[in-house]
Image (tube, rainbow, N blue to C red):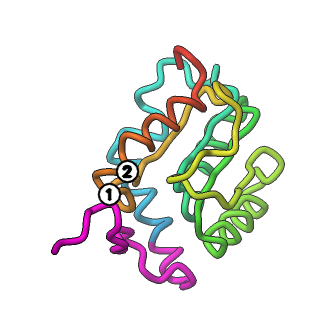
Amino acid sequence: MSVPPEREQPSTYFVQDRANQSEFERLQVQDQMVTSKMGGILPEQPEPEKLRRVLDVGCGTGGWLLETARTYPTIETLIGVDVSAKMLEFAREQAQQQGVGTRVEFTQMDALRMLEFPTGYFSLVNARFSLSYLRTWDWPKFVSELARVTRAGA
């Protein structure tokens, strides 16, 4: 008898060694390359300077969020969430080194559970590499939760 897909526990995450410093550095370079090829940090936003609160779900080493903080100093609050304590520790160190530590917060949280934020709290939610850890049956709940924490019309 086959196992229902919801009960499978395969690792779908493409970062298998979440405690390796050289892997963190590789992820930073990968993030910079993707941002460059996408046309910048927020190419789809007509007025990114009007954003107030930004959430990065599955933020990893914090590359996207840190670049957003440096590029748009008018964004008041930037929060990154990830399940990996080691990656978040690395991200916090980077935030301090880059001088954005007072505006950027990194919190350990599982994106596949209810996010610990009020409804409509964020003006933008980013989940860039979600494909790397989400399984097909996770998507409806995940997208619904991202929509819940995003301000209406954002």
Q: Is residue 12 above or below residue 75?
A: below
Q: Is residue 62 above or below residue 147?
A: below
Q: Amino acid at mark 2?
A: Asp
- Numbered circles on residues, count: 2
Q: Is residue 64 above or below residue 18?
A: above
Q: Amino acid at mark 1?
A: Arg
Disc 2 target residue: 138
Q: Is residue 13 magenta?
A: yes
Q: Is residue 57 magenta?
A: no
Q: Position of residue 125 (x, y in %)?
A: 54, 36
Q: Position of residue 89 (x, y in %)?
A: 70, 71
- Residue farthest to the left, as pictured: 1
| Label 2, residues with CA under 10 Å away: few <14, some 14-19, many ≥20 | few
- Please provide the residue range marked out in magenta: 1-26
SS type, badge 1:
loop
**Quarter of the image with the N terminus in it:** bottom left
Q: Position of residue 37 (x, y in %)?
A: 32, 47
Q: CA distance from mark 1 to mark 2?
A: 5 Å
